[in-house]
Amino acid sequence: MNNELHRRALRRTGIALAGAAAAALTVATAYSAVSQIIAVGSMDYSELIDGPATVTMRTFTINAGEVLGWHYHPGAGAFTVMISGVLNVEDGCGGEAVYTPPQAFLEPPNRVHRGKNLTGDPVVTAQTFIVPQGAATTVATNQQLCGAPLNVRECKRDGWKKFSHPRSFFSLGDCVRYVILGDRLPHHH
């Protein structure tokens, strides 16, 4: 098989696996929120994740009064556009942001959070996920966790002590290294 045919076969396999993973994630959700996959495709290389990627687009509806579980999005995070309703996004480190149409925002990579619809009307969003090929778009933590740090400023003034996801840090320097380099270096426990 020549290289181009081999790449195409790998792409089709990646798309099928990503679609199956997205469908499994939707079925496994214990909430009444509805995820409608619009499209799934693959990229040979994405600068956002420094490698081959799966791109998933969906609409996501959170019903009136529903509070989602704590979770995070790997890869490049979730690019979200508000279509209707009022969405509260609670950060696992504390704080809450409120979004309404036509706002768009990024749910940062690996940052634990949960969405809340505190109104009597549904919230509808459009989302795009860019993740390493084969990775899930959403990972449940089943508990409130703080992290990952978004910038060096969050590590300062003993901020490094509050992080518990994807790991705890043993010093300010350890937290800063994580922000700058990711989790590519060995760390102390």
Image (cartoon, grey):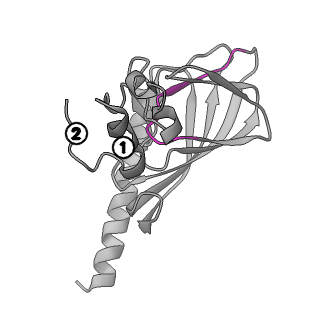
Residue located at (39% from left, 62% from top)? 50
Identify the element where label 1 is drawn.
Answer: helix
Residue marked by disc 2: 187
Numbered-mark total: 2
Residue 141, numbered label: none
Q: Tell which residue pokes out farthest to the bottom in this image.
A: 2
**Disc 1 and disc 2: Cα gap in Å?**
9 Å
Along the viewing direction, whichever of 89 and 151 lies nearer the viewer: 151
Mark 1 and mark 2 lie on one chain; the one further toward the N terminus is 1
Residue 31 percent coordinates (x, y): 51, 20
The quadrant in which the C terminus is found is: top left
Residue 150 counted in the magenta span: no
Q: Is residue 181 left or right of residue 104?
A: left
Give above or below for 180 relative to 174: below
Residue located at (46% from left, 29% from top)? 112
Residue 114 counted in the magenta span: yes
Quarter residue 21 falls in: top left
Identify the element where label 2 is drawn.
Answer: loop
Q: Is residue 85 left or right of residue 180?
A: right
The kind of residue tagged 2 is His
Give above or below for 7 relative to 90: below
Residue 178, numbered label: 1
Q: Are the residues at dot 1 and dot 2 in contact (C-beta closer than 8 Å)?
A: yes
Along the viewing direction, whichever of 37 and 129 lies nearer the viewer: 129
Magenta segment: 107-118
Residue located at (31% from left, 30% from top)? 169
